[in-house]
Amino acid sequence: MRLSDEMLLRVEKPGRYVGGELNAVIKDKEGKTRFGFCFPDVYEVGMSHLGLQMLYFFINRREDAWCERAFMPWPDMLSVLREADIPLYALESGDGIRELDILGFTLQYEMCYTNVLAMLELGGLALRAAERGEDDPIVCAGGPCTTNPEPMAEFIDFFYIGDGEASLDAVLDAYRDNKTRGGKKADFLSAISGIDGIYVPAFYDVKYNDDDTIANFVSNRHEVGSRVKRAFLPRLGYFPERFLVPLVEAVHNRVTLELARGCSRGCRFCQAGYIYRPLRERGIDELLAQAEALLAATGHEEISLLALSACDHSGFGELVDRLLAVTEPKKVNLSLPSTRLDASFLSAVEKTQRVRKSSLTVAPEAGSQRMRDVIKKNLTEEGILAGITQAFEADFNKIKLYFMAGLPGEEEGDVQAIGTLAEKVVEVYYKMPYEKRKKPVAVSVSTACFVPKAFTPFQWVGQVSPEAFETRQREVKAGIRKKQITYRYHDAKTAYVEGVLARGDRRVGAAIEAAYRAGAMFDGWSEHFNYYTWLAAFESAGIDPDFYTQRERGENELLPWDFIDMGVSKEFLRREYERAMKGETSPDCRTSCADCEVACHA
Amino acid sequence: MHKVRIQFSKDGALKFIGHLDFLRVFQQALRRSGLPVAYSQGFNPHILLSFALPLPLGMASLHDYADLTLAESTDMENARVRLQEYAPLGLTVLTIWEADGRSAAAVTEAADYILTVKEAEITTVRQAVHELLAAKEYIIAKKTKGGIKDTDIRSDIIDIKSNGNVVTMRLSAGSGRFLNPMTVAAILLGRDTAACEMIRAELFKKEGEILKPLY
């Protein structure tokens, strides 16, 4: 480590920058492929991310590779590094990230893109892939945002699309073999371009029509196919036996178990529900063994259960019972995910005496039944209120309700229904006999701004303008009269920029660079986000943000991400979109097959 | 319930985490060790662990103390070895012994700090030590809740010895009287203490009028 005590003590939370965590892996760097897992957000966020823990130990299980970590320094540390001319370094070795072989960024949300550029520059690398040389590390990126990698295409040597464990070994083998042969970067990229999930943007050319839509997207190398198939793991296998345990308090300090990947519900707004298909569950015995091993290896006092819809796990009740038998004697808290108040969840809550009964989160997502049908959130008002009644009877008194505003086909009445539903929740509370109402009821309503994403049935729809979002927020507010209800909403302007980045094409990269050059960083943090920096960046890059956000795409338009084979077919997504516009729902995968063309029975 | 006291030292990356973070890290080590720790009652049970005196961010300590309650008695040396085995890098468990009575925090009255000064500063510092010890009072403007107040800190300086570039300061430290070692370092160095190298060497309790280390 190259920072003096004095430098470290000039920043808030120096513990973010010193490494030395429990279970950190230190290796002799000789003869290893050195991989830098780069998380483009602050340490406490990155260290709470299960993907980091999984891939860190997955790569480090190989004797020929060493995975280290780097995080985005908070602005105070950024100034210290820049002033002292110290490059961004990997926490394990203290070596500058430019000394590593492969840097892997995880793109968890679009608003971290400028942080990726900041980290590259802090590491002493040129931002654009084409401007980096043989001495620079290979820069790759993975994570959910790679389902539309195009806005970041100019900066990244290769994208890894799909399940991390599926192809990563093949990529690391290829890197080692190429190095042994004395091959160049281009040889390596060429070698991996045939592996499932690998997309090398430099191997493809894009041509545009006069109306700015994409005319064609073709590979410029005969050996590279025109489509990139996602990396896919038919059965979940690997899970780390240890977790890194941060010294400074992370967002989540706990053991996380991955119950399942994928989801059978297919809510139409939810990208994760489509790109991680099909539903793949881990077995109860396996999860239990992981829980015991990880508690012993970390000393954490909480376990959380991760899945898109954890209560849907086919053995959820049994899993909770058996986990409680492990956690209760150890005084470990079992944190239950609570976005669905169905019977299995409520019965699990009843069993966990150690859950502090205060706040429960429910996500109806839309206020009116019509909109819930459009988005295929299969919840009825009766179901929601019945669940909440049970929760009140079980001594909960605070309910958080999550909604989205700006959904496709939304009308004024649908927005007003959000407030109406919240008021009904309060009324349900007062219907209980007086003796049962021990604590005052509090309902908090929050609305997110709906941003359409790639590989969802809503990938064609126009996003609502910032002004229209703000109108809807005022409408919701006006509809809430009871003093027991508080209302929060997400920033409409952030959603506008996110919309451009989420469905942008390659040309959007110039705007990301311009925004970064103008000082944009930590755009996901409201105190750092500057809308006007972004508007100026779009303008200077010659980009019309409305083209990417508000425009309804034609059925036959070539979308920037169409070259990726994510499993679900475009025809299926279109059918779902058309059903949505007619207000029709479709069945859960477990009930009947909707023919999405993911090979889930293979 | 068996109350024990742990003597430990803290260095490395652990220097850079705050008191509450260190408390959590220590509790995690106890959980991993499988020692029969006792928990508090209530909805959110926690390990009954408390420290004698928080360390300032950035400062290592040679002899530090914590009180821990065990649910059953256990061999002290085995417990020490076991805790050390599961301790994070930078934490050395020196001794554990059964300690009933007042808590380490309650008995701590003074602390020794070792300040390492630069070669060029040795003469200035030696002179400053001499003047400070000769003075009957030493008034500084101290920030308090009610604003800035003149305070005499001389009585909280128990002793200062300077030997070459090593200055050992014994100052009031505890829940009653506490003098910030950085305040004294600033007086001795005649500058801000940004790049100042200091460790806490020992904590003391009073037996009669005599100061004795906690262990």
Image: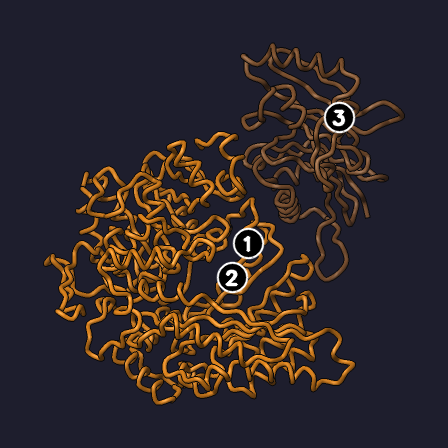
Report the Cα–Cα distance between label 3 and label 1. 50 Å
Look at the numbered disc 3 and give the secondary structure of its residue. loop
The answer for which chain carries disc 2 is A
Q: Amino acid at mark 1?
A: Leu
Q: Amino acid at mark 2?
A: Leu
Viewer-proximal residue among A368 and A481:
A481
Same subunit: marks 3 and 1: no
Say which colour chain A has. orange
Badge 2: residue crowd in 10 Å (few <14, some 14–19, many ≥20): some
Q: Residue drawn 65% across and 78% down? A: A391
How far across and how far down the image is residue B20, in percent?
Answer: 64, 45
Q: Which mark is residue A473?
A: none
Residue A528, compared with residue A591, is above or below; it is above
Badge 1: residue crowd in 10 Å (few <14, some 14–19, many ≥20): many
In the image, A538: left or right of A56? Answer: left
Residue position marked by numbered label 1 in the rendering: A294
Q: Are marks 2 and 1 in contact (CB under 8 Å)?
A: yes
How far across and how far down the image is residue A95, in percent?
Answer: 38, 35
Residue position marked by numbered label 3 in the rendering: B153
Look at the numbered disc 1 and give the secondary structure of its residue. helix
Viewer-proximal residue among A119 and A295:
A119
Say which colour chain B has. brown
Q: Which mark is residue A257?
A: 2
Task: Select label 3 or label 1 by which is in front.
Answer: 3
Same subunit: marks 2 and 1: yes
